[in-house]
Amino acid sequence: MSNRIHPTAVVGAGVVLGDGNVVGPYSVILGPCRIGDGNWIGPHVSIGAAAESRGGPHPVAWEGELDGEGVEIGDRNYLREYVTVHQGTKRPTRIGDDCYLLTRSHAGHDVALGDSVTLSCSVQLGGHTEIGAHANIGMSAVLHQFSRVGPGAMVGMGACVRREIAPFSIAVGNPARAVGVNEIGLARCGIDGDAVAAMAEYVKGHSAVPDGLPPDIASMLTAWERSAPAPD
């Protein structure tokens, strides 16, 4: 299956495209960058521009000058109009599979998105931000660099995340604070019945990862716990 690339789009050196991708008018993809299969990249999307760092390199990548740790994008993602994804500096900036990035959302350098993440319109992710799988970030939310949002969490529109949001919680405000359990997110991941109550205790920090969860969700949460940064 071939890719459909609009003639006004720019696909630079060091870009590796899989199959069945769509690249819309006036979009720019710069290397180093690796993109999987079946992605829909809309008009005026920018992928692979230099990290926003005053002292960092700003190569003319559209003329073949490559620098940075690159961008890696998986399969079946949707990047809508004016989305921006920047080059990594310490690691590749990563977008998993089946993500949906709405208009004008931004993934800064070294960001990592798990699978099935939704970024609503105008979400801004600072550098090194980590978003767990199935998380949903509301319209115009702002995430400070190095912040973390757990798998299945819901961040409300206009929220300001400064540090960490627990998995499968609902967080709102500035600074964003957990106000409940994302029961809709739990249901979408096949968690119901007694497991919902057990997850409520986990979200509040009162228990370890509960028993009885679907194996993929249990593994995801265990991996999230293990990846937590050391206390200050």
Image: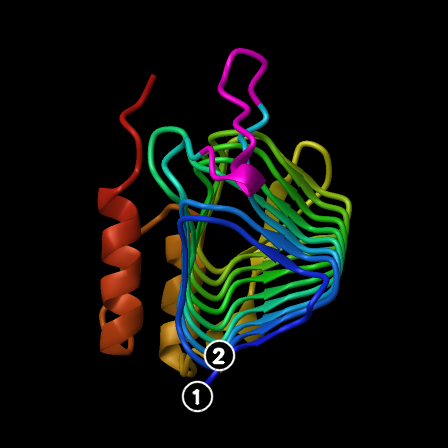
Which residue is label 2 attached to? 38
> In the image, what residue occupies the spot 59% across and 30% down?
144
Q: Quick one: label 1 or label 2, which is nearer the N terminus?
A: 1
The one of 96 and 61 positioned closer to us in this rendering: 61
- Name which residue lies at 45% across and 48% down: 13
Residue 226 place in picture, x, y as percent: 22, 44
Q: Which mark is residue 112?
A: none
Comparing marks 1 and 2, which lies closer to the viewer? 1
Q: CA distance from mark 1 to mark 2?
A: 10 Å
Where residue 90 appears, as percent x and y from the top left, is 34, 29
Estimate how packed mark 1 is, as few (under 14), some (14 to 19) or many (20 or more) residues with alpha carbons within 10 Å: few
Asked if residue 84 shows in the view, the reply is yes
Segment colored magenta: 53-65
220 sits to left or right of 203: left
Residue 24 vertical placement versus 122 (above, below): below
State the residue at coordinates (50%, 35%): 109
Position above or below: 140 against 186: above
Of 163 and 37, the residue lying toward us: 37
Task: Name which residue type carries label 1.
Answer: Met
Residue that badge 1 annotates: 1
Q: Nearer the viewer, residue 126 or 137?
A: 126
- The N terminus lies in quadrant: bottom left
Determine which quarter of the picture holds residue 216: bottom left
User: Quick check: 201 above or below 48?
Assistant: below
Quarter of the C terminus within the rendering: top left
User: Quick one: 172 or 203, which is closer to the camera?
Assistant: 172
Q: Is residue 159 left or right of residue 197?
A: right
Q: Label 2's element? A: loop
| Amino acid type assigned to the residue bearing label 2 in the image | Gly
